[in-house]
Amino acid sequence: MPPSPKTNALDKPVGSLRGVGPERMAHLARLDIHTVGDLLLHQPRRYEDRRHLISIRELKLSEAATTRGRIVAQGLKRYHHGEKSVFEIILDDGTARLHCRWWNLPFMEKYFQVGDEVFVYGKPKSLKPRTIDHPETETIHTGEEDAVHLNRVTPIYPLTEGLPQRWLRALIWRTLEQFERHIAELWPQPPASGARTFLSAATSKGTGATEAFNAESPSIPAAGRNVRALRPDHRLPLSRASAIRRLHFPEEIPDAEIARQRLALDEFIALQIQMQTRRRKFEVSARGLPCSGDNHLIKPFLTQLGFKLTAAQTKVLREMRTDLGGAHPMRRLLQGDVGSGKTVVAACCALMAMESGFNIALMAPTEILAEQHFNNFRQWFEPLGLAVELQTGNRKTSDLRNAQETPELSSLDDTSRGTLFVGTHALITAGLVLPNLGLVIIDEQHKFGVAQREQLVRKGQYPHLLVMTATPIPRTLGLTLYGDLDISVIDEMPAGRGRIRTFVRSNEQLPKVWDFIRAKLTEGQQVYVVYPRVEDTGTSELKAVIEESERLKKVIAPFRLEILHGRLRGKEKQRVMEGFRKNEIQVLLATSVIEVGLDVPNATVMLIENAERFGMA
């Protein structure tokens, strides 16, 4: 087990370190550094190889590089009645001169003096004269600490205003020397959602820690946190202390990546242990509701569908039926590509619970997707005599107020059996009651946090849980991030599905792209066009829906184009989507609001501009 906080030297406040007074403590707190352990886990943002700097003459346009020189001139210029300013220093290294400028940051003047030797990192925006705007800089001071800052692979840390890079680097160096023997005690806490972690740094490269984590339920390694027991052939540092030293002060830049992978492996293991422990506690305390059903609703439902489920859908449903009739509540992640039939599987799962006399809650991340589910499920379930209700911020088909505050609604527990409640975050509103809840379904689960998921589950007495995603999740990552869930995969597409083809085109080829789109529109098909922003902020070259809509209407004339984004009112969104579904609108110009599974079979083409601004999900 991790050591007791009372005996862990790394839990000492960072203010106990030499040279860290109240002002520096406040600076470090803004970086979320409060203890010695926090300081040692403060990752460098990048590294500079200060053994091999390039000269100012060698700088290339728009290529990031590190150089050094001596300040031969500096000055602050104010304009626009003093409201605007530019501070500039000019460096000379004997080969050429470099101008470094900071716009509207007049306080930078106090950090430099003529004659100072300065490291500079940045991208030149001009070579006549050589100029870098807002570079990263570090003034060179000769002294006994030179070995920490010069002639080595040097770490560059995230900072906050008023905290010098050189001071923080020296502090971490001294702290490593003082506390290195205690680092084995610094066993990581599982990373929180959105936290700054070694896990994200390593997995972003697609190698290393993810591959190293090859045990489904590992225990904490033996004393000294030796990872050899987990992967004897993996080339990772054998001790946590070695990894942390290499992270901060590597001999070569690749050593830092190996260290990050080693520390990420620790986080993988700690997170998995937490997941497994939570799962065991859950199974001990929670009894599953009997929701496996008797097929009296599923059989007519499948008959009215008019098509046969795939073998993959049938296999997944067998797994779910076993869970729904098991001793413990189902906790299952359903993964399947767009068009693989996840919604039909969720409908069958809901019918099993309804056959057993329970109600269902289905939560979607957007009103558009919730409305789509509401319409689909109502079309499927109402012929079976089952009620479907909608709860969103803008539309409610039933009043589910708190029965304790409104006693006349307490009979809802008896009258609403066989009801599917579809909604958005409105379903987790504190005053909303979901009676006799047997199953919770969450679509596009990556759009919700764990806390939101738990809020909905707590509307019932340990209801079963099914979460769905179309985002591909590698098995190792699934075991780690979703260790509290069993995973089912629909790995087969229904018959007749076309193959999705993806192409990358440059801006120069855009006219040909629009020729292709107009040809598809002429054939009677519909098109999505996706831009990253609702409107132009004037700060970048990203395309925006509102500004581009009038231009595109002329490009695709005589076909009709409408816009869709998150700022539209609910009724307007509904009008646009309904018009698109009926093919009254041929081109839908939208933001990423459409990314969560809109179902318009006739829309066969999607153009995504500034695609680099969108993630894989």
Image (tube, rainbow, N blue to C red):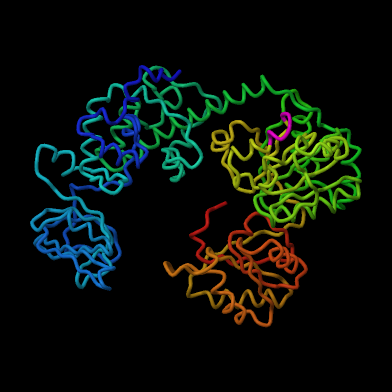
Where is 264 relative to 76, above or below? above
Horizontally, is 23 left or right of 475 in the view?
A: left
Q: Nearer the viewer, residue 562 or 239?
A: 562
The secondary structure that dominates the magenta segment is loop
Q: Is 460 inside the magenta-drawn segment?
A: yes
Where is 612 relative to 42, above or below? below
Horizontally, is 207 left or right of 490 in the view?
A: left
Residue at 73%, 57% in the rendered image: 497
| Magenta-highlighted residues | 457-462
Asked where in the image residue 608 lies, by quadrant, the reply is bottom right
Q: Nearer the viewer, residue 58 or 573?
A: 573
Residue 201 location, x and y as percent?
41, 42
Where is 194 relative to 2, above or below? below
Horizontally, is 573 left or right of 114 in the view?
A: right
Number of numbered callouts drawn: 0
Residue at 85%, 33% in the rendered image: 356
Residue 430 location, x and y as percent?
67, 40
- Quarter of the N terminus within the rendering: top left
Q: Is 105 inside the magenta-drawn segment?
A: no
